Image: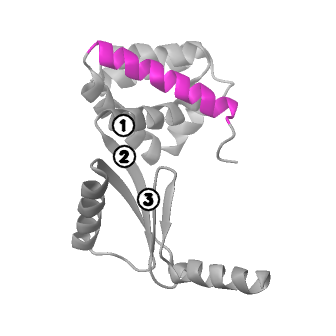
Amino acid sequence: MSGVKTFSNETSERYALALFELANENSEVEVIEKNIILILEVFNQNLEFVNFLKNPTHKLEVQSKVFAEICKVMNLSKTFNNFLQLTIKKRRIYFIDKILKKFIKLSSRSKGKIDATLVSSKNLSQEERDNISQEISQAIKSNIDFAFKTDKNLISGTKIQVGSLLIDTSVSNKLKRLKQSMIEN
């Protein structure tokens, strides 16, 4: 299912790439990334605002004025404001959160950062997290941004996913493989 390209994913990727290329041309990648982080914080804190954006019954002029005012109040870049206005005009504002998150990923990738997930059976201290992140970054010679999660169902051990590579050292995975080999024999 993850390999399936949906309209929203494909559209989000194209718009994010367009914004990234525009920001890159104007040497504004850092500025727009900061703008996006601010807007995403607003999304996360204000459900009414998200509902306003995703409600197709609102007129384009109203959404446009609201975003223009937000850009003015938050002192967002003109390039970012123009991009937001375009997404409203093209009726793609519904996908704005996906577009902005994909932009952040593109920006991270361009800086040589790789997104990864580490799932552990227990809570890890900040020192343990930093050590794991540093060791894996050195091993693959790239800067890794880890998302840390805890899953008690692993029983013991960890699962690390870097791109399409999955390293699963959990006891639950070992038990699953043992069970599978017993069924096959």
* Placement of the C terminus among the 4 image quadrants: bottom right
**Mark 1: amino acid:** Arg
**Mark 3: amino acid:** Thr
Find the distance from the CA under tag 3 to the CA under tag 2.
10 Å
Q: Which mark is residue 114?
A: 2
Residue extending farthest front: 185
**Is residue 33 one of those drawn in magenta?**
no
Q: How is the image coloured?
A: one colour
Find the distance from the CA under tag 1 to the CA under tag 3.
15 Å
Residue 171 appears left or right of 183: left
Find the distance from the CA under tag 1 to the CA under tag 2.
6 Å
Name the image quarter holding residue 6.
top right
Numbered disc 3: secondary structure? strand
Residue 163 in the image: state x and y as whole percent: 47, 49
Overall secondary structure of the magenta section: helix
Q: Is label 1 in contact with label 3 (beta carbons under 8 Å)?
A: no
**Mark 2: amino acid:** Ile
Q: Is residue 109 above or below residue 170?
A: above
Residue 39 appears left or right of 16: left
Give the residue number, with chain letter if any, for mark 1: 109
Numbered disc 2: secondary structure? strand
Crowdedness near tag 3: few (<14), some (14–19) or many (≥20) residues, C-alpha within 10 Å: some
Q: Which mark is residue 74?
A: none
Q: Is label 1 in contact with label 2 (beta carbons under 8 Å)?
A: yes
Give the residue number, with chain letter if any, for mark 3: 117
Q: Please give the range of residues in magenta.
A: 5-26
